[in-house]
Image (cartoon, grey):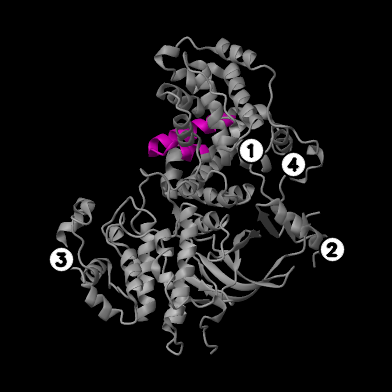
Amino acid sequence: MSGTFQTQLLLSRPYLTRAQIKRAQHNTIPDRRVYNQKRLSVFKLLCDICIQFKFPRKTLETAMYFYQRYYLFNRFESELCYDVATSCLFLSCKQVETMKKITDIASMSLRLRNVLKLSPEIVDNCKKRIVQLELRILETCCFDYRVNNSVHIDDILTKIAKDLSLSREVAHLAWIIAFDALKLEILLMVPQHTTALAALKIACELTKGASWPSIRYSLFESDEPSVSEAYFDLLNFFINAFDLSDLKANLPENLRDTGIETFIELKKQAGLEKGLKEPDNIMSDFLLMSERDFGIRERRYVLSRKRLNDERPIKNTAKREKF
Amino acid sequence: MIAQTEYSKEKKVGEGTYAVVYVGTKLSNERRIAIKEIKTSGFKDGLDMSAIREVKYLQEMQHVNVIELVDVFMAQKNLNLVLEFLPADLEMIIKDTSILFTQADIKSWLLMTLRGVHHCHRNFILHRDLKPNNLLLAPDGQLKLADFGLARNMGSPQDFLTSNVVTRWYRAPELLFGARHYTGAVDIWSVGIIFAELMLRIPYLPGKDDIDQIDVTFRALGTPTDRDWPEISTFGTYNKIQVYPPPSREELRRRFIAATENALNLMCGMLTMNPHKRFDPTQCLTSEYFVELPEPTTPSELPKLTPK
């Protein structure tokens, strides 16, 4: 199909449901286990780089969004994934205005990957790969700057906590919980303020004497299914991997007895697991059914569905063979 | 959705450090457009920040006085930004001595500039490079803020911003002092200088270099004191500068001979040294200047460039 036509018009869909993500990954990730393992070590690498450069959490968050998004539409190869991650971080620095020179980021990434003998040639090659990947990452995100722009989990979390008059203790615990969220695919499913709400809810439920106020999520520009999606995703993560979580390593003094059982109990109390409604048309969804074709000559990206629909009638009649 | 190529590039009209600009056509509706092809090779730090900022901030802004980003597309390996085609800018009009313009024309251009700035600021975006050259003019006379390559979010109060922004002649005093925290007031200062330039028809404060700019600015408008700007002594360079008295009202009247009292009030409001006391876009837009006669010229009746 790609050789026949000259232009492709793609609607940006910055958030997808769990099933949609699975379907997209079906095209790009041959071995899910390897991907998951690598994702954790990539996260560790990105964390270490961020610590070295004293980047704020939003830089890491944006890089993790880019990284996971990249592999929805580009084939996963374990040899390249650290370069992809480094490029994601480099781009995220530009996105959130925590600028660093490419040489610094490339050298740091290589050093933390224990590359012995950091010759200028090795650094230059790494820089080349970072630059090559940069545009591809942006393209995978459809140049959509509505996300990862001004709202980030940690700062919106403190604002919401203040607005709901939650204690400092709860807000701090939620802030720790939210760090674990950065490792999860929830970043690709719901916007940051929704993840913040879910982290706050869990923090309230873990803290003695605190209770999650019954609020309408629309007050915070969110909704029940989205918050539930994030809430259950976090609970499931702690149930499955609490021992590996950063929450466990950073539990406040009075919550030392928190364990997997605590989260199992929370899940039991929450009742039937719910979340975003899965659409019926996944199997006919063009975006998800094949690996993205970056070989098409002109690839246009739009943000609104209306714009896409407006162009559809004209385009359908104008379809023609490439000459 | 796949179909035929949508854009044609017809003529190269300019080349900057990070982009080549073409005039072209959007084929489906024959609309004239400008295409900025971003140069991607040869840059050691990857995709230029200006291109990123331009997409980031123009993407969601829709206002008659802000340039429209029509489309973003990749052609093979190059990033292209499709912008509305705006054939002239305010600098060309100011410099074209064959064009006469009236106080009503100046009011109209200033009003449109302020509306654009107001829209940016209410979306928490600082433009940071306002100058006549970046105020483009549409064929229907509408003025549009363009070049968002230096723009950024207002962000959190604790964020450190670079003071190396805004073209020198339009740079606010807090930037001349190297402030790392500043607000939309830097844009208002630029608009104040543009207003003065429209009245004088020559650049108002043309500093030869960054040091000279400080001298030129304070010689014309007076060196600020810590009485009207208490934080000023926290800037390291403050103690090293020459102290000039502020101009008297009479001196301003003589310099801006055609300006009314309300015009001077507005200009002085925009050129207040202390950024906290400087007018904000709402104060500017509700100024008496826009209520008094003459009414601002209808955009379609504004002077246009004479075809050469």
Q: Is residue A33 visible?
A: yes
Whichever of labels 4 and 1 marks the residue nearer the N terminus, that label is 1
Please state the extent of the stretch shown in magenta in the rendering: A38-61
Predominant secondary structure, magenta span: helix
Residue A169 in which image quadrant: top left
Residue type at the position of mark 3:
Gln
Could you classify mark 3 by the number of other residues whose Cα lies within 10 Å: few (under 14), some (14-19), or many (20 or more)?
few
Residues under labels 2 and 1: Cα distance? 40 Å
Residue A226 in which image quadrant: top right
- The residue that disc 3 covers is B242
Residue type at the position of mark 4:
Leu
Residues under labels 2 and 3: Cα distance? 70 Å
Q: Is residue A75 visible?
A: no
Could you classify mark 2 by the number of other residues whose Cα lies within 10 Å: few (under 14), some (14-19), or many (20 or more)?
few
Image quadrant in which the C terminus of chain A is located = bottom right
Q: Which mark is residue A159?
A: none
Could you classify mark 4 by the number of other residues whose Cα lies within 10 Å: few (under 14), some (14-19), or many (20 or more)?
many
- The residue that disc 2 covers is A317
- The residue that disc 1 covers is A77
Residue type at the position of mark 1:
Glu
Residue in the image at 81% along x and 60% along y: A313
Give me the chain letter of mark 1.
A
Q: Position of residue B224 (x, y in %)?
A: 21, 61
Pick whichever, B287 or A117, lies toward us. B287
Residue in the image at 80% along x and 36% along y: A280
- The residue that disc 4 covers is A288
Q: State the SS at label 2.
A: helix
- Does the CB distance between marks 4 and 1 fall below 8 Å? no
Whichever of labels 4 and 2 marks the residue nearer the N terminus, that label is 4
Pick whichever, B85 or B231, lies toward us. B231
Residue B3 on the magenta span: no
Residues under labels 1 and 3: Cα distance? 63 Å
